[in-house]
Amino acid sequence: MTKADLVEHVTTQIARTAGPMISKKDCARVVDSFLDAIKDALREQHNIEVRGFGTFKIRQRKTRMARNPRTGAPVEVSARPVPVFKPSKELRALVARVPISELSEA
């Protein structure tokens, strides 16, 4: 799903529940603003928790040794922060198509 598909889907959902109150252009602004808010929070090293969906956070990667694929020479990759997403139990259950109660038992 692309961002344009997401805007289309959100616009359709809003029109279905609240009537055609919001234009596709306004909906695109909302989606862009939401994504920008996530990017801004991650840039400032803050976690974002969306209940029932998951958590976006920054994890510190350690320094490690890698290999140059062309020469095979070892190369040190420095430590750096990376964004990660951890899905909620509800989202994992939805994707796996199992009841949430079965996930908590495992």
Image: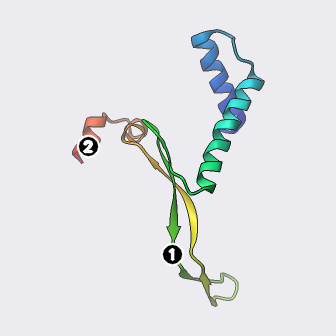
Residue 10 occupies quadrant: top right
Residue at 51% x, 51% y is 47
Residue 86 position (above or below residue 51): below
User: Going from the N terminus, do you reach mark 2 or mark 1 first?
Assistant: 1
Q: Which three-letter amino acid code belongs to the residue tagged 1? A: Lys
> Which one is nearer the viewer's eye here, 3 or 1?
3
Mark 2 lies on a secondary structure that is: helix
Q: Which residue is mark 1?
A: 62
Residue 2: percent from left, percent from top: 68, 39
Q: Is residue 67 above or below residue 43?
A: below
- x, y percent for residue 106: 24, 48
Q: Are marks 2 and 1 in contact (CB under 8 Å)?
A: no
Tell me the residue at 59%/53% (across/down).
Answer: 42
Foreground pick, 49 / 52:
49
How crowded pointer 1 is (Cα within 10 Å; few <14, some 14-19, many 20+) is rated as: few
- For residue 104, the mark is 2
96 or 41, nearer to the observer:
41
Q: Which mark is residue 39?
A: none
Q: Looking at the picture, does residue 29 appear above or below residue 11?
A: below
Residue positioned 41% across, 42% down in the render: 88
Residue 92, picture quadrant? top left
At a point 68% along the width and 30% down the height, the residue shown is 30
Q: Position of residue 72 (x, y in %)?
A: 63, 88
Q: In the figure, is residue 85 to the left or right of 32? A: left
Mark 2 crowdedness (10 Å alpha carbons): few <14, some 14-19, many ≥20: few
What type is the residue that disc 2 sits on? Ser
